[in-house]
Image (cartoon, coloured by chain):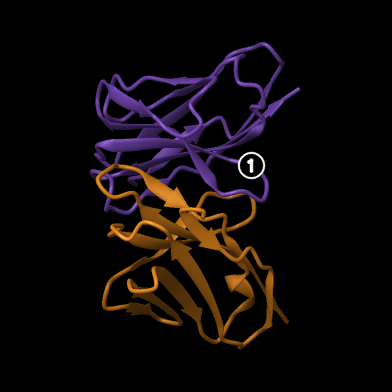
Chain colours: A orange, B purple
Amino acid sequence: RKEVEQDPGPFNVPEGATVAFNCTYSNSASQSFFWYRQDCRKEPKLLMSVYSSGNEDGRFTAQLNRASQYISLLIRDSKLSDSATYLCVVNMPGTYKYIFGTGTRLKVLA
Amino acid sequence: DGGITQSPKYLFRKEGQNVTLSCEQNLNHDAMYWYRQDPGQGLRLIYYSQIVNDFQKGDIAEGYSVSREKKESFPLTVTSAQKNPTAFYLCASTTSGGADTQYFGPGTRLTVL
């Protein structure tokens, strides 16, 4: 089992749709979780940190399910500009290391 | 403005040559990282450094070397021993690592001719 797994997609959705991605992680001791956005041929940029209680930033909502060891990202009212690859990142407990998923590609269609 | 800079943006190298990629940060971060990204792949850790004058191998360190003589700088050398060096190289930093947000530089795209 991979340490961090994501569905690669692509998820093709119309503008205005709601779309959700999940990311599973294998180490139950992981404490820090992040969603990054990466545009084609660019560096990853932080979208959201994921807190135990869940958190929301505008149209974006992140949640953590420790029992099932996954985090989720919900995007409401999708915009064309949301088209990108979304990377799930989990810390490796007791280290300075982070484990990256391979990313989920989202295409928002006009 | 605070941030991470990487240079050059594009780099072309002949087989058998060593090349050094620059990474500088003015965020006063202690921890710095080098990742490699191949098309359609996730980021893989090459080396990381928790503090000046100290660094550790990541998952794919073979054929690479680093130094951390200054807090602000973490250059990566891609040696001729790296069998497949063509990739997108990303430098990142965090306040102290582990639980903190990583911030990335714009990356260097290396092509071996």
Query: Does residue A37 show up?
Result: no
Rendered position, A37 above or below A97 = below
> What amino acid type should be assigned to the residue bearing mark 1?
Asp
Residue B78 shown left or right of residue B94 in the figure: right
Q: How many marks?
A: 1
Q: Residue furthest front?
A: A1
Q: Position of residue B29 (x, y in %)?
A: 26, 40
Rendered position, A88 above or below A59 = above
Residue at point 57%, 59% (across, down): A103
Quarter of the image containing the C terminus of chain B?
Answer: top right
The residue that disc 1 covers is B38
Residue B75 shown left or right of residue A55 in the figure: right
Residue at point 35%, 62% (across, down): A33
Asked which quadrant contains residue A64, the reply is bottom left
Residue at point 33%, 45% (across, down): B2
Q: Position of residue A7 (x, y in %)?
A: 60, 66
Q: Residue furthest right?
A: B113
Residue at point 61%, 88% (across, down): A16
Question: Crowdedness of circle 1 by 10 Å Cα count: few (<14), some, many (20+)?
Answer: few
Rendered position, A36 above or below B68 = below
Q: Position of residue A38 (x, y in %)?
A: 55, 57
Front residue of B113/B57: it is: B57
Q: Position of residue B109 (x, y in %)?
A: 62, 35
Query: Does residue B59 show up?
Result: yes
Front residue of A15/A25: it is: A25
Chain at numbered mark 1: B
Residue B55 shown left or right of residue B109 in the figure: left
Rendered position, A75 above or below B57 = below
Disc 1 element = loop
